[in-house]
Image (tube, rainbow, N blue to C red):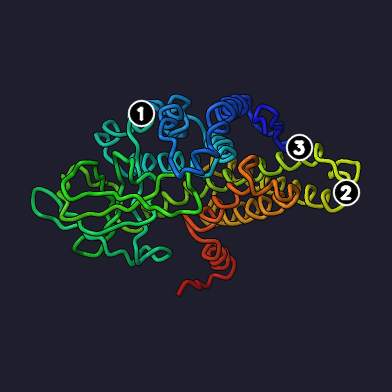
Amino acid sequence: MNPQNYQAADYFQLDELFSEEHKIVRTSIRDWVNRAVKPIIEDYAERAIFPIHLIKELGSLGAFGPYLPEKYGCAGLDYTAYGIIMQELERGDSGIRSAASVQSSLVMYPIYTFGSEAQRLKYLPGLATGELIGCFGLTEPNHGSNPGGMESRLHDAGDHYVLNGAKMWITNAPVADVAVVWAKDESGIVRGVIVEKGMKGFSAPETHGKWSLRASSTGELVFDEVMIPKENILPHIKGLKGPMMCLNSARYGIAWGAVGAAMDCYDAALRYSLERKQFGKPIASFQLQQKKLAEALTEITKAQLLVWRLGVLQDQDKASPAQISMAKRNNVAMALNVARETRQILGAMGITNDFPMMRHMMNLESVITYEGTHDVHLLITGHEITGIGAFT
């Protein structure tokens, strides 16, 4: 379908709640997605190749770390603008949004928040432009939802540290120049460290055979006696609070991004239903098709209102981790259901790459799992409302 004919769903006139700057940012990213992502993404997804040439284009658009200060080459925007960027990128593809989300929330954010000024000046400008690509090492082969059980170890060897261990399911790993990695020191305290491509003993093999996020670069991080300069330790954080704060920022972006995927599916289904004729009239005239479209628009609208309010709270530094968790869980589940239901409107055509539903559906099966699974986010809300933790 022609991406230039895309009509964004805005049933409750949310545009009136966004500033002119927000709208300019949205138009810029939306036009770029229509021009640079939509025409190629099905081909790259089918071939399971990450369109790495888009990284520098995203950098030139200011899509990396947009809420960080201009001093470090970033756009100096607010969190609502960041959310809007993630929404438009995921309308293109979850893999493109994932790359930007990891770069912004899981690499640039911790370097800015927990790093030294020297680290900020060394890494952030290159990450902002896309000259450098980053990844985030937390999840391990044996520890996903329980990051506190991590087995990666950081040993103080006097004038340097030695890092051993492995991370798994790492977005951008095979193409990353910089990795923000979390490991336990000799006292069992989680520390953050910046690992650079080319360090002896550091490798990042690619993960193959994915049915989801096929246009995303995914891999492992393997550390075999890697010597880490002491100036690469993030000095201003100790413990799991650090990576959890990063995940909160990433989950915030995902909550917005999932809405973009749902909007893309809804738009494609609506346009198709008005053009496709059966029994002498458009299938949009049949009750069950209208039911699917009306329910999809309703759920998208609810999710839009949820992330708009979350953006306001985040800009006021009032958004809680539990609120972000609820939005991530709700909106990804919503988007996955919208993808499935709108796919049915297209019948057999819906499984082809002429339309985006199947690709979004497969991608969202990963999004509903990463940065906290659907069920774990449910327990986060349960803990918040009862005061009783149910994780163990």
Q: Position of residue 302 (x, y in %)?
A: 71, 48
Q: Is residue 17 left or right of residue 201?
A: right
Residue type of the residue flagged with mark 2: Phe
Q: How dense is the environment of label 1, judged by Cα within 10 Å: few (below 14), some, or many (20 and up)?
A: some
Is label 1 in contact with label 3 (beta carbons under 8 Å)?
A: no
The image quarter containing residue 186 is bottom left
| Observer-nearest of 219 and 29 | 219
Q: Quadrant of the N terminus?
A: top right
Residue type of the residue flagged with mark 3: Arg
Q: CA distance from mark 2 to mark 3?
A: 14 Å
User: Which residue is depicted at the point 90% across and 46% down?
Assistant: 279
Q: Position of residue 392 (x, y in %)?
A: 45, 75
Chain-order first, disc 2 or disc 3: 3
Please name which of the two marks, 1 or 2, marks the residue nearer to the observer. 2
Q: How dense is the environment of label 3, judged by Cα within 10 Å: few (below 14), some, or many (20 and up)?
A: some
337 relative to 359, above or below: below
Chain-order first, disc 1 or disc 2: 1
Label ID, residue 72: 1
Residue furthest to the bottom in view is 392
User: Which residue is depicted at the point 53% across and 28% down?
Assistant: 36
User: Which residue is depicted at the point 58% across and 57% down?
Assistant: 329
Q: State the residue position of label 3.
A: 271
Q: How dense is the environment of label 2, judged by Cα within 10 Å: few (below 14), some, or many (20 and up)?
A: few
User: Which residue is depicted at the point 84% across and 41% down?
Assistant: 277
- Looking at the rendered structure, the secondary structure element under dot 3 is helix
Q: Position of residue 29 (x, y in %)?
A: 56, 29
Q: State the residue position of label 2.
A: 286
Residue type of the residue flagged with mark 1: Tyr
